[in-house]
Image (tube, rainbow, N blue to C red):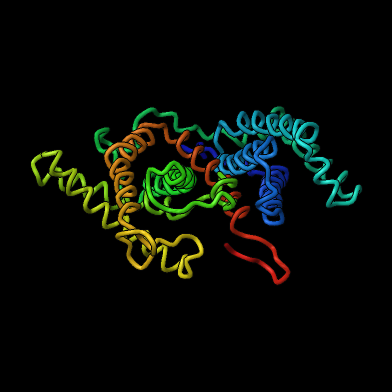
Amino acid sequence: MGETSKQKKIAFGPIIRIIEIYFVLVMATILGYALMMPAGSFAYDITLLRIIVVMAAAARSVWLIERRSESTRRYVVISMIAVIVISVLDMIFGGEYERIAAVVTMPVLVAGGILYFGGSIFIVCYFAFSEHAKKVFVEPDNKSTQPTSDVDENIYEKPFTWPWFRNLVLYYCVFSIMGHWAEIGFCWLIVLGVVMGDYDFSHAQLWDWWLCPYPAEGIAVVLIALLLFPFKEWVLKKTGGRVWLTLIISFVVNMIVCASIDFTTGITANANYELWDYRDLPFNFMGQIVLQNTLVYSVAATFIVWVVYPLMAKWLHRMPPRYANGLFVGFVAFYVFLEVLYYVHVGPNGFVFG
């Protein structure tokens, strides 16, 4: 019989499957670490850098292994060497050794260290020198520099395709964090007396936990990508390209949407006015929304619709798919860590959310 047009894929074998399980267990351990650690005691130091690298390396490695990508061996070797180096630095200079030793016994500490560092070194050696790995990971990467859509001017990915879904998730994750920073900036406007309102420097979630995601802001940008940007493009076409008229209409619609999101968030998460209370400010509605805030949010939303989102969409659209997918996997893995760290805790009665 003649050879088939496609060579039969070589089985992964037990070692590669065990390595995949190892990566999954590493990610689960990091999430367990986030689950057990009080958010207020988490420091933004080399430990955070280590967590970013480890989560991104493990998640991306599993992704590439399952795809049999030819870049798997190179990526795993480089990323695991980085993990080993940063972990050693964290143990020596970051005080991670003392923190772990304070909560586990010495035999558990030694066994965990052997498993963590020994496993990492074995993975580096296996992917660098194993002939079996060289035969398994042969699927060519998509190295095309072409955009993900046929027409470069069309920055809006085809709905319900992988690039469309991937980009929406990235928008949500990125702007959930950046939205927190925007909230800090707005509060400083209050501190400086530029806008009316109260501020509380003891609010740790706002001022101290500066990587804590604010999902409402991420959802708002997803709505911009799904609704407000297409609406702006539609109005621009209907008005014959009249930018100023389109800008006014777009701003009014953005204001309605922002007020609706803000009010919905208020009556669901701030029913008792624990997070904010605008009842003493002029032009408020039920103490949940106030005109000055709505105007600020609307300006920000309009800026995102007209400037930020088109630039980000073009950037992702023109990025080679393998880089965009790698960005997606690494960022989402770290975002999951942040969500667990700040919003999920283990209490005396079990899991506590929020």
The location of residue 161, given as percent across then percent down, is 36, 49
Q: Residue at x 60, y 44 (%)?
A: 59
140 sits to left or right of 204: left
Q: Is residue 297 visible?
A: yes
The image shows residue 330, relative to residue 284, as above or below, that is: above
119 sits to left or right of 55: right
The location of residue 329, given as percent across then percent down, is 53, 43
306 sits to left or right of 129: left
Q: Nearer the viewer, residue 109 or 141?
A: 109
Q: Nearer the viewer, residue 24 or 92?
A: 92
Q: Nearer the viewer, residue 290 or 241?
A: 290
Q: Residue at x 35, y 52 (%)?
A: 293
Q: Residue at x 53, y 38 (%)?
A: 7
The outermost residue toward the right is 107
Residue 51, by quadrant, is: top right
Residue 170, by quadrant, is: top left
The outermost residue toward the left is 240
**Image label count:** 0
The location of residue 235, given as percent across then percent down, is 15, 47
Q: Is residue 335 visible?
A: no
86 sits to left or right of 305: right
Q: Quadrant of the C terminus?
A: bottom right
